[in-house]
Image (tube, grey):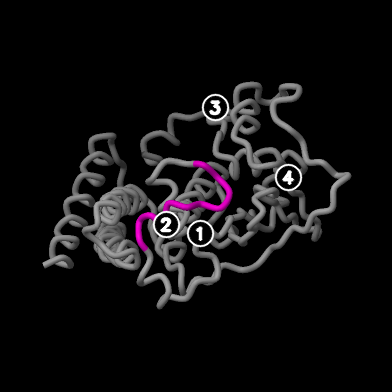
Protein backbone atom coordinates (compact mmCIF):
# COMPACT_ATOMS: atom_id res chain seq x y z
CA UNK A 1 0.00 0.00 0.00
CA UNK A 2 3.00 2.35 0.06
CA UNK A 3 2.32 3.77 -3.45
CA UNK A 4 -1.04 4.95 -2.09
CA UNK A 5 -0.21 5.87 1.51
CA UNK A 6 3.19 7.56 1.26
CA UNK A 7 2.17 10.40 -1.08
CA UNK A 8 -0.58 11.34 1.42
CA UNK A 9 1.64 11.31 4.49
CA UNK A 10 3.34 14.45 5.76
CA UNK A 11 6.44 14.78 7.91
CA UNK A 12 6.15 12.84 11.19
CA UNK A 13 2.67 11.56 10.31
CA UNK A 14 3.79 7.92 10.15
CA UNK A 15 5.34 6.81 13.44
CA UNK A 16 6.69 3.23 13.38
CA UNK A 17 5.59 0.71 15.99
CA UNK A 18 7.64 -2.24 14.74
CA UNK A 19 10.58 -2.54 17.15
CA UNK A 20 13.26 -2.33 14.44
CA UNK A 21 11.81 0.76 12.79
CA UNK A 22 11.07 2.42 16.10
CA UNK A 23 14.75 1.85 16.91
CA UNK A 24 15.83 3.36 13.58
CA UNK A 25 13.60 6.41 14.10
CA UNK A 26 15.18 6.97 17.51
CA UNK A 27 18.73 6.49 16.23
CA UNK A 28 18.18 8.82 13.27
CA UNK A 29 17.56 11.68 15.67
CA UNK A 30 21.32 11.65 16.32
CA UNK A 31 22.03 13.13 12.87
CA UNK A 32 20.67 14.24 9.50
CA UNK A 33 19.41 11.73 6.94
CA UNK A 34 22.08 12.96 4.54
CA UNK A 35 24.74 11.95 7.07
CA UNK A 36 23.62 8.30 7.10
CA UNK A 37 25.86 5.68 5.51
CA UNK A 38 23.51 2.77 6.19
CA UNK A 39 20.68 1.48 8.32
CA UNK A 40 21.24 -1.89 9.99
CA UNK A 41 18.30 -4.01 11.13
CA UNK A 42 18.90 -6.89 13.50
CA UNK A 43 17.35 -10.35 13.22
CA UNK A 44 17.21 -13.02 15.89
CA UNK A 45 17.96 -15.62 13.23
CA UNK A 46 14.78 -17.49 14.10
CA UNK A 47 14.60 -21.12 15.27
CA UNK A 48 16.75 -22.37 12.38
CA UNK A 49 19.80 -20.15 12.79
CA UNK A 50 22.85 -22.15 11.68
CA UNK A 51 20.83 -24.73 9.73
CA UNK A 52 21.84 -25.97 6.29
CA UNK A 53 19.37 -26.24 3.40
CA UNK A 54 19.44 -30.01 3.86
CA UNK A 55 18.35 -29.63 7.49
CA UNK A 56 15.65 -27.14 6.52
CA UNK A 57 14.16 -29.59 4.04
CA UNK A 58 12.87 -31.70 6.92
CA UNK A 59 11.44 -29.07 9.30
CA UNK A 60 7.79 -29.22 10.30
CA UNK A 61 5.30 -26.47 11.21
CA UNK A 62 5.78 -27.40 14.87
CA UNK A 63 9.54 -26.87 14.53
CA UNK A 64 9.08 -23.55 12.76
CA UNK A 65 6.61 -22.20 15.34
CA UNK A 66 9.15 -22.52 18.17
CA UNK A 67 10.68 -19.01 18.12
CA UNK A 68 13.60 -18.58 20.54
CA UNK A 69 12.91 -14.95 21.58
CA UNK A 70 9.50 -13.51 20.72
CA UNK A 71 5.94 -14.74 21.26
CA UNK A 72 4.10 -14.05 17.99
CA UNK A 73 1.24 -15.28 15.81
CA UNK A 74 1.77 -18.20 13.39
CA UNK A 75 2.30 -16.10 10.22
CA UNK A 76 4.90 -13.80 11.78
CA UNK A 77 6.64 -16.73 13.49
CA UNK A 78 7.01 -18.61 10.19
CA UNK A 79 8.18 -15.39 8.53
CA UNK A 80 10.84 -15.16 11.22
CA UNK A 81 11.90 -18.74 10.48
CA UNK A 82 12.31 -18.02 6.74
CA UNK A 83 13.63 -14.48 7.46
CA UNK A 84 10.88 -13.12 5.22
CA UNK A 85 9.91 -10.91 8.15
CA UNK A 86 13.28 -9.21 7.88
CA UNK A 87 12.86 -8.85 4.14
CA UNK A 88 9.52 -7.10 4.64
CA UNK A 89 11.14 -4.91 7.28
CA UNK A 90 13.88 -3.93 4.80
CA UNK A 91 11.19 -2.73 2.39
CA UNK A 92 9.42 -0.94 5.24
CA UNK A 93 12.62 0.88 6.22
CA UNK A 94 13.30 1.78 2.59
CA UNK A 95 9.85 3.34 2.27
CA UNK A 96 9.69 4.99 5.70
CA UNK A 97 13.12 6.59 5.70
CA UNK A 98 13.65 7.13 1.99
CA UNK A 99 17.02 5.41 1.66
CA UNK A 100 17.82 3.08 -1.27
CA UNK A 101 17.93 -0.65 -0.64
CA UNK A 102 21.73 -0.70 -1.02
CA UNK A 103 21.99 1.43 2.14
CA UNK A 104 20.03 -1.09 4.19
CA UNK A 105 21.56 -4.14 5.81
CA UNK A 106 20.60 -6.99 8.15
CA UNK A 107 22.73 -8.72 10.78
CA UNK A 108 21.82 -11.68 12.98
CA UNK A 109 21.71 -10.83 16.69
CA UNK A 110 20.28 -13.84 18.59
CA UNK A 111 19.82 -11.99 21.89
CA UNK A 112 17.35 -9.48 20.35
CA UNK A 113 18.63 -6.71 22.62
CA UNK A 114 19.92 -4.32 19.96
CA UNK A 115 16.91 -3.68 17.72
CA UNK A 116 18.54 -1.61 14.97
CA UNK A 117 21.54 0.61 14.28
CA UNK A 118 22.38 3.64 12.16
CA UNK A 119 25.89 3.98 10.78
CA UNK A 120 26.84 7.58 9.99
CA UNK A 121 29.35 8.84 7.42
CA UNK A 122 31.92 9.72 10.11
CA UNK A 123 32.20 6.05 11.10
CA UNK A 124 30.11 6.25 14.26
CA UNK A 125 27.19 3.89 14.87
CA UNK A 126 24.18 4.70 17.03
CA UNK A 127 22.16 1.74 18.31
CA UNK A 128 18.93 1.33 20.27
CA UNK A 129 19.06 -1.42 22.87
CA UNK A 130 16.41 -2.76 25.25
CA UNK A 131 15.04 -6.14 26.35
CA UNK A 132 12.61 -7.63 23.79
CA UNK A 133 9.32 -6.07 24.88
CA UNK A 134 6.81 -4.52 22.48
CA UNK A 135 5.47 -2.20 25.17
CA UNK A 136 8.44 0.09 24.59
CA UNK A 137 8.04 0.80 20.83
CA UNK A 138 4.25 1.05 21.26
CA UNK A 139 4.60 3.58 24.08
CA UNK A 140 7.21 5.49 22.10
CA UNK A 141 4.89 5.73 19.10
CA UNK A 142 2.00 6.92 21.25
CA UNK A 143 4.14 9.55 22.99
CA UNK A 144 6.32 10.58 19.98
CA UNK A 145 8.55 12.52 20.13
CA UNK A 146 8.43 12.27 23.93
CA UNK A 147 9.00 9.24 26.16
CA UNK A 148 6.75 7.51 28.66
CA UNK A 149 8.52 6.92 32.00
CA UNK A 150 9.03 3.23 32.83
CA UNK A 151 7.27 2.04 29.67
CA UNK A 152 9.20 -1.24 29.91
CA UNK A 153 12.07 -2.74 31.94
CA UNK A 154 15.54 -1.44 31.03
CA UNK A 155 18.73 -3.45 30.51
CA UNK A 156 20.38 -4.50 33.77
CA UNK A 157 23.94 -3.30 33.18
CA UNK A 158 25.14 -4.82 36.46
CA UNK A 159 24.82 -8.34 35.02
CA UNK A 160 27.34 -9.94 32.67
CA UNK A 161 26.05 -10.52 29.17
CA UNK A 162 27.34 -11.35 25.70
CA UNK A 163 25.86 -9.86 22.55
CA UNK A 164 26.55 -11.71 19.31
CA UNK A 165 26.38 -10.22 15.80
CA UNK A 166 26.89 -12.34 12.69
CA UNK A 167 26.08 -12.11 8.96
CA UNK A 168 22.96 -13.66 7.47
CA UNK A 169 23.57 -16.83 5.45
CA UNK A 170 21.75 -15.63 2.33
CA UNK A 171 22.64 -18.86 0.54
CA UNK A 172 20.34 -20.68 2.95
CA UNK A 173 17.80 -17.96 3.70
CA UNK A 174 16.92 -16.56 0.29
CA UNK A 175 13.93 -14.48 1.41
CA UNK A 176 16.12 -11.43 1.94
CA UNK A 177 17.26 -11.49 -1.69
CA UNK A 178 13.64 -11.71 -2.82
CA UNK A 179 12.62 -8.79 -0.64
CA UNK A 180 15.49 -6.66 -1.95
CA UNK A 181 14.42 -7.48 -5.49
CA UNK A 182 10.81 -6.48 -4.77
CA UNK A 183 11.88 -3.34 -2.90
CA UNK A 184 14.14 -2.22 -5.73
CA UNK A 185 11.42 -2.88 -8.30
CA UNK A 186 8.96 -0.81 -6.28
CA UNK A 187 5.42 -0.21 -7.45
CA UNK A 188 3.18 -3.16 -6.64
CA UNK A 189 6.01 -5.69 -6.29
CA UNK A 190 6.11 -5.50 -2.45
CA UNK A 191 2.36 -6.16 -2.30
CA UNK A 192 2.87 -9.16 -4.57
CA UNK A 193 5.68 -10.42 -2.33
CA UNK A 194 3.51 -10.17 0.76
CA UNK A 195 0.41 -11.73 -0.78
CA UNK A 196 2.27 -14.68 -2.28
CA UNK A 197 4.16 -15.25 0.97
CA UNK A 198 0.99 -15.29 3.09
CA UNK A 199 -0.55 -17.88 0.77
CA UNK A 200 2.58 -20.03 0.86
CA UNK A 201 2.92 -19.82 4.65
CA UNK A 202 -0.73 -20.83 5.08
CA UNK A 203 -0.12 -23.85 2.84
CA UNK A 204 2.93 -24.83 4.88
CA UNK A 205 1.01 -24.60 8.16
CA UNK A 206 -1.74 -26.76 6.61
CA UNK A 207 0.80 -29.39 5.52
CA UNK A 208 0.35 -28.69 1.80
CA UNK A 209 3.83 -27.26 1.19
CA UNK A 210 7.35 -27.99 2.41
CA UNK A 211 9.28 -25.35 4.32
CA UNK A 212 11.85 -24.66 1.58
CA UNK A 213 9.09 -24.44 -1.01
CA UNK A 214 7.65 -21.34 0.70
CA UNK A 215 10.37 -19.09 -0.70
CA UNK A 216 10.46 -21.00 -4.00
CA UNK A 217 6.77 -20.30 -4.61
CA UNK A 218 7.12 -16.65 -3.62
CA UNK A 219 10.19 -16.28 -5.83
CA UNK A 220 8.30 -17.41 -8.94
CA UNK A 221 5.37 -15.07 -8.28
CA UNK A 222 7.62 -12.09 -7.50
CA UNK A 223 9.77 -12.69 -10.59
CA UNK A 224 6.68 -12.35 -12.78
CA UNK A 225 5.67 -9.12 -11.03
CA UNK A 226 9.16 -7.61 -11.26
CA UNK A 227 9.38 -8.43 -14.95
CA UNK A 228 5.98 -6.85 -15.56
CA UNK A 229 6.95 -3.77 -13.58
CA UNK A 230 10.15 -3.33 -15.60
CA UNK A 231 8.21 -3.61 -18.85
CA UNK A 232 5.72 -0.93 -17.79
CA UNK A 233 8.49 1.37 -16.51
CA UNK A 234 10.43 1.06 -19.78
CA UNK A 235 7.36 2.10 -21.73
CA UNK A 236 7.10 5.57 -20.26
CA UNK A 237 6.36 7.60 -17.14
CA UNK A 238 6.29 6.12 -13.65
CA UNK A 239 2.83 4.62 -13.13
CA UNK A 240 0.50 5.74 -10.34
CA UNK A 241 -1.57 3.29 -8.31
CA UNK A 242 -4.88 3.28 -6.50
CA UNK A 243 -5.94 1.23 -3.50
CA UNK A 244 -7.89 -1.01 -5.88
CA UNK A 245 -4.63 -1.70 -7.78
CA UNK A 246 -2.92 -2.74 -4.55
CA UNK A 247 -5.79 -5.03 -3.54
CA UNK A 248 -5.87 -6.61 -7.00
CA UNK A 249 -2.10 -7.18 -6.95
CA UNK A 250 -2.44 -8.91 -3.57
CA UNK A 251 -5.31 -11.13 -4.71
CA UNK A 252 -3.60 -12.00 -7.99
CA UNK A 253 -0.40 -12.90 -6.14
CA UNK A 254 -2.31 -15.20 -3.79
CA UNK A 255 -4.04 -16.84 -6.73
CA UNK A 256 -0.76 -17.38 -8.58
CA UNK A 257 0.82 -18.79 -5.43
CA UNK A 258 -2.09 -21.18 -4.88
CA UNK A 259 -1.72 -22.47 -8.44
CA UNK A 260 1.96 -23.19 -7.84
CA UNK A 261 1.20 -24.81 -4.48
CA UNK A 262 -1.39 -27.10 -6.08
CA UNK A 263 1.11 -28.03 -8.77
CA UNK A 264 3.80 -28.78 -6.17
CA UNK A 265 1.43 -31.08 -4.30
CA UNK A 266 0.19 -32.97 -7.34
Q: Position of residue 228 (x, y in %)?
A: 24, 60
Q: Nearer the viewer, mark 1 or mark 3?
A: 1
| Cβ–Cβ under 8 Å for marks 1 and 3 | no
Residue, disc 1: 47
Alpha carbons under labels 4 and 3: distance apart: 24 Å
Q: Position of residue 188 (x, y in %)?
A: 32, 49
- Sequence order check, earlier mark of 2 and 1: 1
Disc 2 secondary structure class? helix
- Sequence order check, earlier mark of 4 and 3: 3
Residue, disc 4: 129
- Among all residues in the image, which is located at the extreme left? 266
Residue, disc 3: 13
Residue, disc 2: 64
- Magenta span dominant secondary structure: loop
Instruction: Classify the position of the N terminus by image quarter.
Output: top left
At a point 18% along the width and 56% down the height, the residue shown is: 256
Mark 2 packing: few (<14 Cα in 10 Å), some, or many (20+)? many
- Sequence order check, earlier mark of 1 and 4: 1
Q: Is residue 203 left or right of residue 21?
A: left
Is 52 placed above or below 149 here?
A: below
- Sequence order check, earlier mark of 4 and 2: 2
Alpha carbons under labels 2 and 1: distance apart: 7 Å
| Residue 236 seen | no
Stretch of the chain drawn in magenta: 60-71
- Among all residues in the image, which is located at the extreme front? 62
Amino acid sequence: GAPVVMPLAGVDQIIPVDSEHSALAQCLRAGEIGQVRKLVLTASGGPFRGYTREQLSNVTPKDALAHPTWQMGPLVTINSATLMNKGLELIEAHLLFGLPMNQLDVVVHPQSIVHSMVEFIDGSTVAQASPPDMRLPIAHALMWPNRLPDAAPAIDWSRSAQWVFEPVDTGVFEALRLAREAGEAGGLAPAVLNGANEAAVAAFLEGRLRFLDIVEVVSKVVSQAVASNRTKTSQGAKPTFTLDDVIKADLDARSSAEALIAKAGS
